[in-house]
Image (cartoon, grey):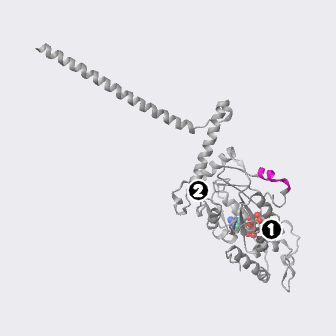
Amino acid sequence: MAHRFLSSTNRFSARFAFIFTVSLSCTYLCYSILFCRSTIMTNQGYEGKRCPPSKSAGGKKLLGKLDNCASLEVRSALEESAARRGSSDVRDQSKTPGSSGSNWADTKLRNMSVAQKYGNKKLPNALIVGVKKGGTRAVLEFIRIHPDVRALGTEPHFFDRNYDRGLDWYRGLMPRTLDSQITLEKTPSYFVTREAPRRISSMSHETKLIVVVRNPVTRAISDYTQTLSKKPDIPTFEELAFKNRSVGLVDTSWNAIRIGMYILHLENWLQYFRLSQIHFVSGERLITDPAGEMGRVQDFLGLKRIITDKHFYFNRTKGFPCLKKPESSSQPRCLGKSKGRTHVQIEEEVIEQLQEFYRPFNIKFYETVGQDFKWD
Ligand SMILES: Nc1ncnc2c1ncn2[C@@H]1O[C@H](COP(=O)(O)OS(=O)(=O)O)[C@@H](OP(=O)(O)O)[C@H]1O
């Protein structure tokens, strides 16, 4: 009896051990399948994003991989950029990666290096066309810190002096850009060049134009101050500005005067471009409120407002706003010595005569652009 009891207990234990072993094996098998799969997935994701360090590292197969890497990097930069552009809510910027100080600088640097490797040279989508001494350098240097903007640092003078060289020459001067980035150049003399609007519109009807305008009297004095610094023997400002000062007859053939008759030049541009394609920056507000003016420039270019008052500080020695971090360095930087010069002293009466002369041109200009620049 005791023997029978023992053998049935043994059989029960053996069956229990068998079932336990089978279920343990099943559990292990399932676990292994799941674990292994997730490891493979993780690795695939990682490999897909990892790129070999240099092209010389392999043969054809590796080159094929490099293409994937390139497109991945470019795609991620594009997605990042598209995501940034997607949200136009300015109030939300403090929460977006692009607007925080270091992320913005990182993004700019990343976009620049990706663009340098994989971007293309493209004809500009936007031009700062004028006006001379309006503050065009400041606008260019300020806007080019935006990660979605790449600008030519020098003035190419294509649509005035170098048009014969052709569009391929012009394109060749441009920095490489990703599809999502804007190519920009500035040449202030375009604004007063008769052929420039027609030539630019034949390059593209859709070109966006930026004009930095400033009180034409101050602009003329600034222009004269610059010429005087290069040619100290020129006649006085008063001598050049008037044909007959006693009757207040202004010499409109003098370029320093003529450039400030903004409405005359604008009418030429409006034969080829809609007013909505032209954005006017106030040269005065650019100094007193650079972030506000640059906010409007970013809106006009369809860019997210990344450049804000955080990017500027007022340099007391220079007497102008300067950048905390320009595009090319991590150091604060002001514009050069030729920007923000002390002007030659001009008699108050001469200034009033010129204000009087410009008034009707200014009023017509305000009416046409729909903005009062408060020069009068
Ligand atoms: N942040 C900042 N720093 C320095 N200068 C500034 C700035 N913002 C605007 N400005 C004004 O820009 C004026 C020069 O204009 P441009 O750059 O258009 O000159 S140029 O046509 O390219 O020679 C220059 O004119 P001047 O003051 O007569 O030298 C400045 O008044």
Q: Which residue matches tag 1?
A: 192
Residue 198 image point, x, y percent: 80, 63
| Cα gap from disc 2 to disc 1, whole angstroms | 34 Å
- Point out the stretch of residues depicted in magenta: 164-172
Mark 2: amino acid: Arg
Q: Is mark 2 within 8 Å of ligand 1?
A: no
Q: Residues within 10 Å of mark 1 (few under 14, many from 20)?
A: many
- Pick the quarter of the image with the N terminus: top left
Residue 124: percent from the left, percent from the top?
73, 56
- Pick out the residue farthest to the bottom: 247
* Residue 295 lies within the magenta run: no
Q: Report the predominant secondary structure element of the magenta stretch.
A: helix
Q: Dot 1: what SS? A: helix
Between 93 and 320, the residue placed more toward the observer is 93
Residue named by callout 2: 85
Q: Within the magenta stretch, is there residue 168? A: yes
Report the residue at 75% width, 64% height from top.
Answer: 129
Q: Nearer the viewer, residue 335 or 105?
A: 105
Mark linked to residue 246? none
Foreground residue, 110 or 361? Answer: 361
